[in-house]
Amino acid sequence: MDEDVAQTLRVLRGHLAELVPAADTAEVDRQVAALLRESDDERLLGQLTTLYGAVPGLEAWVSSVLADPLHRPPAAQDRAVRGVDRPPGDGEPVAADRFGCPERDYIWYRLSVAMPVPRCPTHDRVLIRED
C-alpha cells in the first residue's frame, strides 16, 4: 500500500466521529482498520470506493488530507490561515498536536488543548504525541 494512502487512513480513523453518525462510527472504523491491513492495491481501491459511497463527504475529506503535504485533517489545515489579516510581529501559526498509536494504525490531531487525548480504538493503548 502506498504510504500516503496508509497515512491518510490512519488519520481518518482519528476523525471518523466528525464524518460518520455516532451509530455507524464503530463499524466504519472496523472497515478502515481492515483497509490498513489490505496488501492488494486493486482490492483496496475497490473497498475504498465502496466506503466513499456509504459515507457522504468522505471522498472529499480523504482527497483533502492526501493533498496536504503533512497529511493533516482539513480542520488542522485551516488553522494556518485563520486569524487577522496582519497581526503585529512575526507570529506563526500554531500547529495542531499529532498523536499516534504505538502500533502505527491510528492517528489523531488535537485541535485544542482542551480536547482530551483518546485511546486507540483497536489496541486500547494510550496515544503517544508525535513530532
Image (cartoon, rainbow, N blue to C red):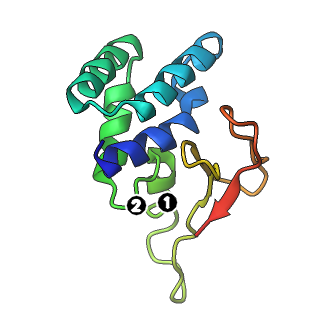
**Residue 24: which quarter of the image?**
top right
Q: Residue furthest front?
A: 39
* Residue 108 rendering spot, x and y as whole percentages: 60, 47
> Who's the residue at 51% across and 58% down the image?
79
Q: Is residue 74 left or right of residue 62?
A: right
Q: Residue furthest bottom?
A: 89
Task: Please name whichever residue, 96 or 123, is drawn nearer the observer in this view of the structure.
Answer: 123
* Residue 118 rendering spot, x and y as whole percentages: 74, 42
Q: Is residue 110 visible?
A: no
In the picture of the structure, the residue carrying the numbered disc 1 is: 82
Q: Which amino acid type is marked by label 2?
A: Leu
Mark nearest the camera among 1 and 2 is 2
Mark 1 lies on a secondary structure that is: loop
Query: Is the residue marked by circle 2 packed among few (<14), some (14-19), or many (20+) residues within 10 Å?
Result: few
Q: Which amino acid type is marked by label 1?
A: Arg
Question: Which quadrant would the C terminus be assigned to in this image?
Answer: bottom right
Residue 16 against residue 77 in the figure, above or below:
above
Q: Is residue 41 left or right of residue 58?
A: left
In the picture of the structure, the residue carrying the numbered disc 2 is: 70
